[in-house]
Amino acid sequence: MTDKSNSRADHDAAGKRSLGPSQKGLPTRISTDDIAARRWNVLAGDLPFPVAVLKQSALARNSRWMRDFIAATGISLAPHGKTTMAPKLFHQQIADGCWGITVATAQQAAVAAKYGIKRILIANQLVGRANIAVILDLLRQYPELELYCYVDSPAGVAQLSTAIAGTGLSLNLLLEVGFHGGRTGCRDRAAVQETLDAVAAADRGLRLGGVAGYEGLIKAADTATSEKAVLSFLDLLIEAFDLCHRRDAFKPTADGSSEIVVSAGGSSYFDLVARRLTPLREQGDVRIVIRSGCYLTHDHGIYAEEFPDLQRRIGSELAARLGRMEPALYLWAMVQSQPEPGLALLTLGKRDAGHDAGLPMPVMRRPASGGTSLPLDAAWRIDRMNDQHGYLIFPPEAPVAVGDLICLGISHPCTTFDKWRNLFVVDDDWTVTDSIPTYF
């Protein structure tokens, strides 16, 4: 397969912007090129609150962790770009050896392509004339772009076939396998057969290049049962792969590549995916692609809770060699009111922090009077949030004051990133060193 590397010019373009106070977290109008020189410091109050920041040291650690995991397992990674929608981070991931970038929508694919990503996996069904037209326009505009998307029904194949007919374009398809009660994907062998029949009868511009699925919604009463269910789902994916192979359904690309993509692992179970699917490589030119996107920032919530299980599954030797991941995404807010004992209102709410997988977690307090930042225990918690306020519950004897800074960790990075058009990168002293724009 041809190299799909990205140019330095594309990388630079992904990060250049003129920013100002109309965007959250910005104290003044400034070019992103000048941010590092300002040496703004969060703890010094140089930025308006709330503000979202990424710790550079944690980003580097997590990036190195996944790079080493990929090297140890021999699989490929196309991290889900919807997590950050930050092309500057996409390029960091590509530089770390990622095979491509995963997205979920035509708009997200357009952003990735505009900023120089040459291989894009759309982990979703493309339906609707306008959505499909966006993707076909990308293929025209970027001749080197390699695109994959899912199909799971004759109806879906028909929409793509009608749209691509007569264009001379080529689109790679991945047959998606699902599970009962889950999301999209063929539920059984009959659905796989019907979809394969439709692909075989479709316009020649559609090429079946592999199979894919998503195990992240599989949740059972306990961890052991969940892991068993994930493995059972992966066995269904393998059955679909074998069926496609027997039918000679996988076709070479226009440039003669016969590589077959098998993809799953868009969750914290990516290690199980790597272990279960790796033997498929013995059946030919097969590339196993996981899609975990939250590894780069990790979190203080669901991924932190599930990480010890991942370490157990990969074994003590590899776990020790890889080390741990660290939360990289933090929100800083200020106490703006302390109306009752044990209650403070923060300058942060639903417009600033995701709460689909748990409320933000207070992890540190910087007194308004200055001095040392103090770690916080479980007695400090966010009880609820309004649009612009967070209700901080704390021990009544704690000397909380208006103007104190509260640092919060989050759970599930995706739904916090999408609330910010700009995030600052900070060093371990919380001094701003860079800026990361997002494109939601």
Image (cartoon, rainbow, N blue to C red):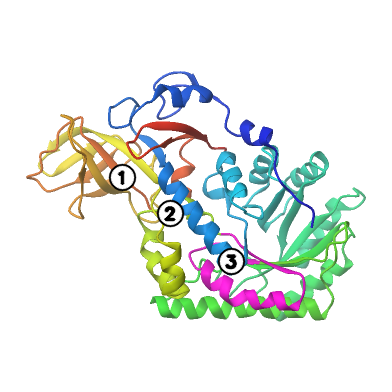
3 or 2: tag closer to the N-terminus? 3
Q: Looking at the figure, which quarter contains the N terminus?
A: bottom right
In the image shown, does 389 or 59 lie closer to the viewer? 59
Kindly identify which residue carries mark 2: 298
SS state under label 3: loop
In the rendered structure, which amino acid carries the disc numbered 1?
A: Leu
Judged from this view, the residue extending furthest toward the left is 397
Residue 282 belongs to the span the image colors magenta: yes
Estimate the spatial distance between the alpha carbons at disc 1 and disc 2, rounded to whole Å. 14 Å
Query: Which is nearer the N-term, disc 1 or disc 2?
Result: 2
From the top left corner, tell me how far across and down residue 69 is, in percent.
53, 63
Residue 266 in percent (x, y) is at 56, 62
Q: Quadrant of residue 323?
A: bottom left
Q: Nearer the viewer, mark 3 or mark 2?
A: 2
The magenta-colored residue range is 263-291
Q: Nearer the viewer, mark 3 or mark 1?
A: 1
Q: Residue at x 43, y 54 (%)?
A: 298
Q: Is residue 273 above or below residue 438?
A: below
- Alpha carbon of mark 3 to alpha carbon of mark 2: how far? 19 Å
Residue 392: x and y in percent read 22, 44
Does dot 1 land on a helix, a strand or a loop?
Answer: strand
User: Within 10 Å of the Cα at label 2, are there few (<14), some (14-19), or many (20+) other Cα atoms?
Assistant: many
Residue type at mark 3 is: Tyr
Residue bearing mark 1: 408
Are circles 3 and 1 on residues that touch, CB within 8 Å?
A: no
Q: Which mark is first along the chain, 1 or 3?
A: 3
Q: Which residue is mark 3?
A: 214
Q: Is residue 187 magenta?
A: no
